[in-house]
Amino acid sequence: MEPLILGIESSCDETSVALLRGKQVLSNIISTQIKIHEEYGGVVPEIASRKHIEAIDIVMEEALKEAGVTLDEVDAVAVTAGPGLVGALLVGVSYAKALAYALHVSLIPVHHIEGHIAANYIAFPDLKPPFVALVASGGHSHIVYAKAEMEFEILGQTIDDAAGEAFDKVARVLGLSYPGGVKIDHLSKQGNKDAYPLPKAKVQGYNFSFSGVKTAVMNLLHHAEQVGESVNKADLAASFQENVVQVLREHTIAAARERNVKQICLAGGVSANSRLREVFDEMKDEFSIYYPPLQLCTDNAAMIACAGGILHRQKIVAPLDLNAYPSVKLGERIL
Ligand code: KG4
Ligand code: ZN
């Protein structure tokens, strides 16, 4: 039987614990703090840490119950060690260290982005590298070449805002609540994506820049307000979304062609976007396109346990003085 891995995720505003055997999810409990941070229009780090502390015991109990297992059956504890909010990360890391120590099992440090990519291994257990992954979330926008199961090369990344961050900021100026990505996605369905032409940033290589398009939306709204013109919010949301989605698509496809790979994986919160999925699905003649189900796109511990299981097989173990690494890069081993 494959080892039983307990995964813990607490890098931002979701407290999550999952139990996996190989790529099979026995439980994946997610307690989200969205309602709490909503009134501030974004995540408040200090509040996030406190809420993780309150939630983590309850979430773990529920995860064990749903999986129908006990702690003494756990073979290893995997935890997001970075990147993320340092106080939030420390809650999960401290909890995982205590658990691994008490249970006499290995502690496995997982990079949050390799977790997001691993969500595709849960959804598609037969998926094998090489592939190119687009990881787009609230904190990251990376194009990654996966050479082997946990071996990555960054081909491109954002030079300013992450894609999800741009979605959330634009949503805010459109009067939509945090986190705005999913609300823009829904509103865009009633809008015309060609209504407002917005600038596409020219950035070197496969890097991205989303602050220009974000500022263009803000300027357009300010200008309209000053001259007393009305703005069709659904049209503006759809135009913004189309701009971001096309930039993500163009760069990812170009990177995949250059590397001559035929598989593309989408990952991270923004990969839940329905238009993003649609434009990638249109490339199915040339590439096999993979994206996880919605609940595995946004932050969850199942993806961390899955990545942890692979690292466990590779005998990657962290010492019990493991720290949290708020800005560790993908590919840098956390030890
Ligand atoms: O992966 P995630 O849960 O957390 C980070 O690691 O950052 O991603 C959250 C981000 C938020 O910015 C949220 O607005 C965005 O993913 N998001 C979406 C959609 N669902 C979530 N963006 C666009 N369309 C969506 N449907
Ligand atoms: Zn994430």
Image (tube, rainbow, N blue to C red):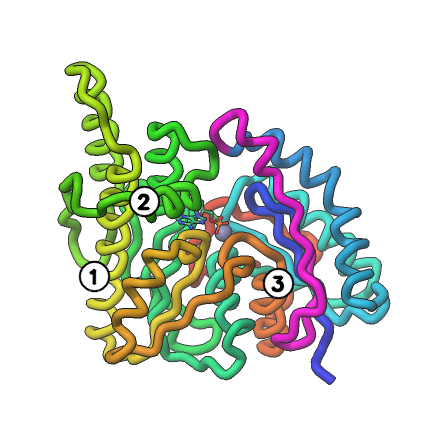
Residue at the image position 46 percent from the left and 65 percent from the top: 117
User: Please, what is the three-letter code of the amino acid marked with disc 3?
Assistant: Ala
Which residue carries the number 3 mark? 302
Cα distance in 3D space between marks 1 and 2: 24 Å
Q: Where is residue 201 in the image (x, y as percent from the top left)?
A: 16, 45
User: Please, what is the three-letter code of the amino acid marked with disc 1?
Assistant: Glu
Disc 2 packing (10 Å; few <14; some 14–19; many ≥20): few
> Which secondary structure, mark 2?
loop
Which residue carries the number 1 mark? 250
Which residue carries the number 2 mark? 190
Picture quarter with the C terminus: bottom right
Figure check: 94 above or below 27: above
Disc 1 packing (10 Å; few <14; some 14–19; many ≥20): few
Which is more N-terminal, label 2 or label 1? 2
User: Please, what is the three-letter code of the amino acid marked with disc 2?
Assistant: Gln
Q: Where is residue 275 in the image (x, y as percent from the top left)?
A: 33, 56
Picture quarter with the N terminus: bottom right
Figure check: 228 above or below 102: above
Q: Is residue 39 magenta?
A: yes
Q: Quadrant of residue 309?
A: bottom right
As rendered, which of 171 and 46 lies closer to the eye? 171
Q: Does the magenta stretch include residue 309?
A: no
As rendered, which of 83 and 194 lies closer to the eye? 194
Cα distance in 3D space between marks 3 and 2: 34 Å
CB of residue at label 2: within 8 Å of ligand 1?
Answer: no
Q: What stretch is highlighted in magenta?
A: 17-42
Residue 179 placement, left or right of 219:
right
Instruction: Please report contact status of discs 3 and 1: CB closer than 8 Å, yes or no.
Output: no
